[in-house]
Image (cartoon, rainbow, N blue to C red):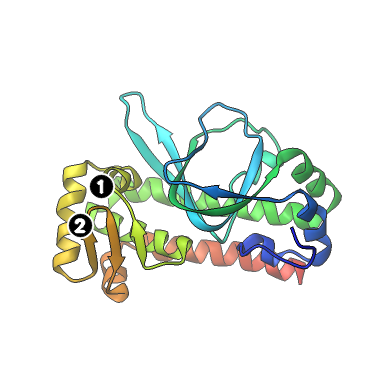
Amino acid sequence: MDSGSRPPNGLLSSLSANDFDLIRPHLRNIDLTSDMVLIEVDETLKRAYFPHKGVISLVVKLARGEHVQVAMVGRDSVFGAFAALGDATALNSAVVLVPGVASTIELEPLRAAADRSATFRAALVRHGLAIHAQAQQTAGCNAAHTVESRLARCLLQTRDLSGSDKIVLTQEAMAQMIGARRNSVSLVAHTLQQANYIHYSRGHIEITNLDGLRKTSCECYATVKAQYSRLLHAQESCTA
């Protein structure tokens, strides 16, 4: 990687020059291809991922075979933050939801950087907490809110994390995102399209009315954004 360049990832961009220099020689770019499995539950995570674009889905597999998404990681954060600070055993699977590119680093140099710099370690902790907060909010959302509001929330989050109004998502992927059946997702996607909030065809989604989709979403979308803003703004204040 060029010594003067910064990958377009929110966490990496927020680091001080000294903290970034601790990990810069160890960063490598990889393609995140659609449905690429980064880790399975109970496996040992060997590297962390800083997406530039694309979205990683953190998934829980249930006994009857269902797959339910608990959180997403995109261009503003990192997958593997807590693994660098402690136990690297994966508590869930991680799959590429939206293809893109990421910087990746093996856990050993990432841990070494966290040991050398308190501010870098604090950044990893805050990003890990933000993803944990998202997972908690998602659990409550899936239990209490309608399929329509949950799908609107997930589409908005995917848009934010990928940086694009155009998203490729199958019905199966959307069902996994909100913990619902595929036929329910099909009906709700049709409703959102009839309202002219999205255009949906063969897995290709374009958000055409952002305000309308926000009004349809439950409060969980705004809650997660506020949690991220609080945690990550605090990080920027500490590194300023």
Q: Is residue 74 above or below residue 71?
A: below
Q: Is residue 114 above or below residue 52?
A: above
Residue 123: image location, x then y, percent: 70, 57
Cα distance, mark 1 to mark 2?
Answer: 9 Å
Q: Is residue 101 above or below residue 197?
A: above
Which quadrant of the figure has residue 17? bottom right
> Would you say 10 lies left or right of 92 here?
right
- Which quadrant is home to the C terminus? bottom right
> Would you say 239 lies left or right of 234 here?
right
The residue at which mark 2 appears reads as: 189
Cβ–Cβ under 8 Å for marks 1 and 2: yes
> Would you say 94 lies left or right of 205 here?
right
Q: What residue do we see at 15% from left, 61% from top?
A: 191
Residue 85 appearing in the image: no
Q: Decide: few, some or many residues near mark 2? Use Cα within 10 Å; few <14, some 14-19, many ≥20.
A: many
Residue 180 appearing in the image: yes
- Say what amino acid the circle numbered 2 marks: Ala
- Say what amino acid the circle numbered 1 marks: Gln
> Would you say 215 lies left or right of 108 here?
left
The circle drawn on residue 160 is: none
Q: Earlier in the sequence, mark 1 or mark 2?
A: 1
Q: What residue do we see at 71% from left, 70% from top?
A: 237
Q: What residue do we see at 63% from left, 68% from top?
A: 233
Q: What residue do we see at 62% from left, 29% from top?
A: 44
Residue 144: image location, x then y, percent: 29, 49
SS at circle 1: helix
Residue 137: image location, x then y, percent: 43, 52
The residue at which mark 1 appears reads as: 171
